[in-house]
Amino acid sequence: MTEFDPALLAAAQTSKAWPFEEAKKLLKRYPDGKPGGAPVLFETGYGPSGLPHIGTFQEVLRTTLVRRAYEVLTGGAPTRLLAFSDDMDGLRKVPDNVPSRDRLEPHLGQPLSRIPDPFDAGFESFAAHNNAMLRRFLDRFGFEYEFVSASERYNSGAFDAALVGVLTQYQAILDIMLPTLRAERAATYSPVLPISPATGRVLQVPVEVVDAAAGLIRFTDEDGQVVEQSALGGQAKLQWKVDWAMRWVALGVDYEMYGKDLTDSGIQSGRIAQVLGGRKPDGLIYELFLDENGEKISKSRGNGLTIDQWLAYGSEESLGFYLFREPKSAKSLHVGVIPRAVDEYWQFREKLADQPVEQQLGNPVWHLLGATDPARGGAGDSLPVTYGLLLNLVGVLGAGATRDQVWSYLGNYIADPDPARHPALDVLVERALAYNRDYVAPTLVRRAPAPGEAAALRALDAELAALPEDTPADALQTLVYEIGKHEEFGFAALRDWFKALYETLLGSSQGPRMGSFIALYGIANTRRLIAEALDGAG
């Protein structure tokens, strides 16, 4: 059992951070620990009908945070995390974001694990490809989990005993589900979905239980033939809500979180789990992610960010940070949120080392670092340059800027501009170059300064001309402030002066602390920007 500092244990008991609040639910579930010292079982679910997106990843991350919080609260009680793939589901529609879509059409209705991989990536099925993509990132991030495939459990017979339980309680399950369905749906509803021996499709047809103990069922196939076959060994699967409940009971799941859109499903599955002799897991109901248009993210539509897209423009840590905060509030999830997430992560990380333990437990970075060990993760690390400032620098350098160019400018700002000594910053240099190339450079338009703005720029240029290149950023910032305060230039407020600087020099309506930018870009280079702006003023 892991040993924890007594002060940490005491602080955890009173912490209001949401992972600890969730973990305390499990303390109420098992006041004396899980019987027999068995591990508390956490689960996340994934439907591999489309490419994994960040909404999938967040469940594993957030569940892991609750898992670690529970371990702290209990002084290191054993836990397990299952990442479960619902790859026995029938393919209902061809996703928009896959190649060779016409090759999937003939396989509509068949289990995802029995459909050829349209990506031709060497995987045995469409589900295997998507499962591998999910696992690749989970492994990269360092999650500790066990991957479980529904197809493997059904096909191997590992779920057979639980399926017999469903058949035995068939009518009781119908009594739960039928009142929740429209009349048309209720007429054909069955908790068990047989797989057609003729077409291999998962069938939505009425089923008669012939012999529950033997797992024998009867149904009418698509060709009109009455079929009597076993529901065991991968010859059938369960309807979604029944499947969810069966899994909870068969695996002994203690904790699973899910999205707000599954609230009703969770209620019904919980009742079914009780009928099957089990208990609904504890868990968090989280709000959904929205795209830039405020619409729900969908795997099949591909309107959300993929994991790889976030990592092309931001860091792993920033992704975790964005997902950590306020899980019960809806969040927009698009490339525009990445820069702020990167900088806020580092702001919280820099604070961590100087915080008392009570505040550390409320710091997202403590949780993201898995900070059961105070020395883990380099608490108190900081970046010498913010990501936002990097983006402004790269924006001025243009879409063709290179890593070496950026580092040469960083030499104006930091004492040891060696990428090897600043690996986290070096990663962000590459990300900033990509973000600028794909999203910023196409939108940058420098406008000509108005007469009062031009006069202020000339005054700034004159002041800069008298300063050495190594003038500190704070001194430069003070200089910029003082010029903006001069009534003769006509700025109603300082923010108007800064907006003018951003729009005329950087081509954007928003920007960094100008003192920091000038120190990074260089006084001489900044004066050239001013000269270009003044040329545009006519």
Image (spheres, rainbow, N blue to C red):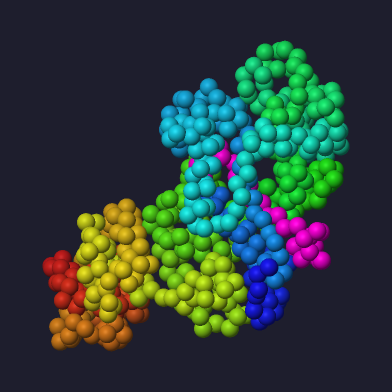
The answer to which image quadrant residue 225 occupies is top right
Q: Is residue 390 left or right of residue 243?
A: left
Q: From the viewer's side, name the closer residue of 218 and 179.
A: 218
Query: Which quadrant is home to the C terminus?
Result: bottom left
Which image quadrant is residue 450 in?
bottom left
Query: What residue sits 23% from the left and 77% below the top?
Result: 412
**Residue at point 31%, 68% (across, down):** 420
Q: Position of residue 493 (x, y in %)?
A: 35, 80
Q: Is residue 274 left or right of residue 534?
A: right
Q: Residue at x 81, y 59 (%)?
A: 35
Asked if residue 50 lies in the magenta stretch, the reply is: yes
Residue 178 lies, in percent from the top left, at 80, 35
Taking the spot 35% from the left edge, 76% from the top edge, the residue there is 384
Which is more toward the observer, 17 or 453?
17
Question: Can residue 58 be seen in the rendering of this structure?
Answer: yes
Above or below: residue 380 compared with residue 510: below
Q: Which residues are magenta?
A: 25-52
Q: What percent of the width, then of the height, locates residue 446?
A: 24, 63
Whether residue 20 is visible to the viewer of this picture, yes or no, is: no
Q: Is 461 situated above or below 124?
A: below
Taking the image as shown, residue 443 lies to the left or right of residue 62, namely left
> Is residue 131 inside the magenta stretch?
no
